[in-house]
Image (cartoon, rainbow, N blue to C red):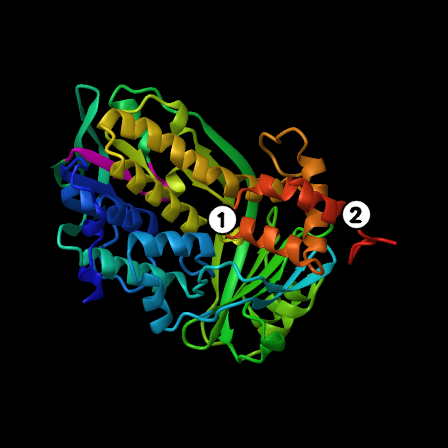
Amino acid sequence: MPAQRSVERSAPRSAPRYERVVVAGGSVAGLAAAAAVAPYAEQVCVVERHPEAGTAQASIVPQGGLPHVLLAGGAAALDRLVPGIVRELFERGAAGDTTGPRPCHWWAFGAVRDHVPDLGAELPMASRALVEATLRRRVAALPNVTLLHGTATGLAVADQGVAGLETADGGLPADLVVDGTGRAARGEEWLARAGFRVPERERVPVDVSYTAVDVARDPSDLGGALFAVVQNDAACARIGVALPAEGDRWQVVLGGYFGASAEPSYDGMLGFAGSLPDPAIARLLRNPWVSGVRRHRFPASERTRWDKATLPAGHLVVGDAVASFNPIYGQGMSSAVLQAEALAALLRDGRDRRELTRRHARAARAVAEAPWRVATGADFLYAETRGSRPPGTDRVNRYLARVMRRSADDEVVNLALSRVQNLMARPESLMHPRIAARVLGGGRLRGAAA
C-alpha cells in the first residue's frame, strides 16, 4: 500500500528521536508538517478542531471553496515528503498530467502568454478538497500518526521549552509543538500567557472580495488552455482565474479589490467578468454551471515575525500562521509545504530543540519571503493599499509589468517568470543581467503603449 511507504526510511540513524510531537491544525500546513516530523518521532498527534478531523473528504478551511493550485515547487516538495502523492492526485482526477509546456491563457499588462514552459516538475491541478483529503488520508496512514478532534488553547511551557499543547479537553505532553492553525492562529496569545514577548506582525490591507463557481469544462475550451488568468493591473483592480479540477470542471473565481465584488448570480458574475480587460473568463462563465456560488473575503495579507521573537524551545510555526498572502496568487499551499520540508531538513541535520526552533523560524520566514513580495508587491499597484510600502516598489512594479509583457514572446523570460511564479526561483532572479537585457531591450513590447 503506497501510504505505508513511510518517509521513516529516509531518517538517518543518528537523527534525534522525539517521544511525541503535537501538531495543531489539520489542514495542508499541519498535515505536511506531520509528514515532515513523522520519521523523527515515536508518536505524532495532529489536533484539529473541525469535527471530522480524521475523515473529512473536503477542505476544512474557510477559503476551501475557492480555486486552489499546488504550484510546481510545492508539488515537488510534497512528493518528497509523501512519496507518490502527486501521481495519486492524477489518478484521482487532477488535470495537468502532461510533460513539456503547458498551454494557458494568461493576460497581463496588455499581452497574452499562451504557455508555461517545461519546468521539469509536475503540475497537478485539482480542487483544494482533493489535495487536502488525499494528503489527510496518506498522513493518517503513517503508523505513528494519529489525527485527533480537539481545540488548541495554549502552550504548556517548562524551563523555557515547550512541554505540550493545551486543549479544551486537557493537555497533550510533547517534545515539539507545531502551530499550523492558519490565519486563526492564536500563537501570539499563547506566548504572552507563557511569559514570552509577542512577535511583531505586518499587515497589508487590500479588502479583496471573491466570488467563485464551478462550470463544465471541455478540453477544447480557450483553444485547449490548461488554465486561464486575467490579471489585475494599475488600471483595473479586478482579476479573474479559471483552473481545471477533477470531474471535468473549471473552478472560476472573480476578485475585486477595496470592496468591489461580483454579485453571486449568473448575470452578476458575467457582468463582472465582462469588465475585465480580456474576455476569456466571461466566455467560460457561459458554460453550464455545475455548482452553487461561493464567496470569500480576504481583508489583508499578514505575516508574523517569528524569526525575530524569542520562542520556547520546541515551538515551531508553519503555514498561514507564518504568512498569509492574497489567495489569488495561489501560493498558500505551496508555501506551507515548503516550510514543512525546511523543517524536515533541519530535523535530518540533528538540531537540538532550541537550535531547531531558531533555525526553523528563519527558514520558514525565508520560504514565505518570496510569495510575500510577489503578493504584496502586486497589491501595492494601488494607492489605496495600506501598509509598509517597501522602498522602490513602484519602480519594481513597472519592471515586472515589462517582464510579464515580454514573457508573451520571449521563451527565456517566460521560463524565468514561470519559475518564480511556481516558487522554484526567487523574485530577484528576474533582475539577473541576462533576463534584464531581454526585458529592457530588443524592440517594442507587446501591449506597450505607442
Residue at the location (50% across, 47% down)?
298
Q: Is residue 81 left or right of residue 282?
A: left
Q: Give the range drawn in magenta.
A: 174-185
Task: Mark 1: give few (<14), some (14-19) or many (20+) Cα within 10 Å.
Answer: many
User: At which x and y percent is residue 247?
Assistant: 41, 76
In the rendered image, residue 177 lying in the magenta stretch gets the answer yes
Residue under the image location 54 percent in, 42 percent down: 426
The residue drawn where x is 39% and y is 30% is 362
Badge 1 marks a residue whose secondary structure is loop
Residue placed most toward the observer, 368 or 298: 368
Q: Amino acid type of disc 2?
A: Gly
Q: Position of residue 44 (x, y in %)?
A: 17, 45
Q: Nearer the viewer, residue 98 or 335?
A: 98
| Amino acid type, residue under disc 1 in the picture | Leu
Residue 194, given in percent of the width and then of the height, sits at: 24, 23
Mark 2 touching mark 1, by CB under 8 A?
no
Q: Which mark is residue 423?
A: 1
Is residue 190 visible to us here? Answer: no
Farthest residue toward the right? 450
Q: Is residue 449 magenta?
A: no
Are there few (<14), some (14-19), or many (20+) residues within 10 Å of tag 2? few
CA separation in Å, label 2 and label 1? 26 Å
Q: In which quarter of the image is the C terminus?
A: bottom right
Query: Which residue is disc 2 drawn over?
Result: 441
- Residue toward you, 65 or 318: 318
- Residue occupying image coordinates x 41% and y 70%: 94
Q: Earlier in the sequence, mark 2 or mark 1?
A: 1
Res 217 visible: yes
Q: What element carries label 2?
A: loop
Quadrant location of the N terminus in the rendered image: bottom left
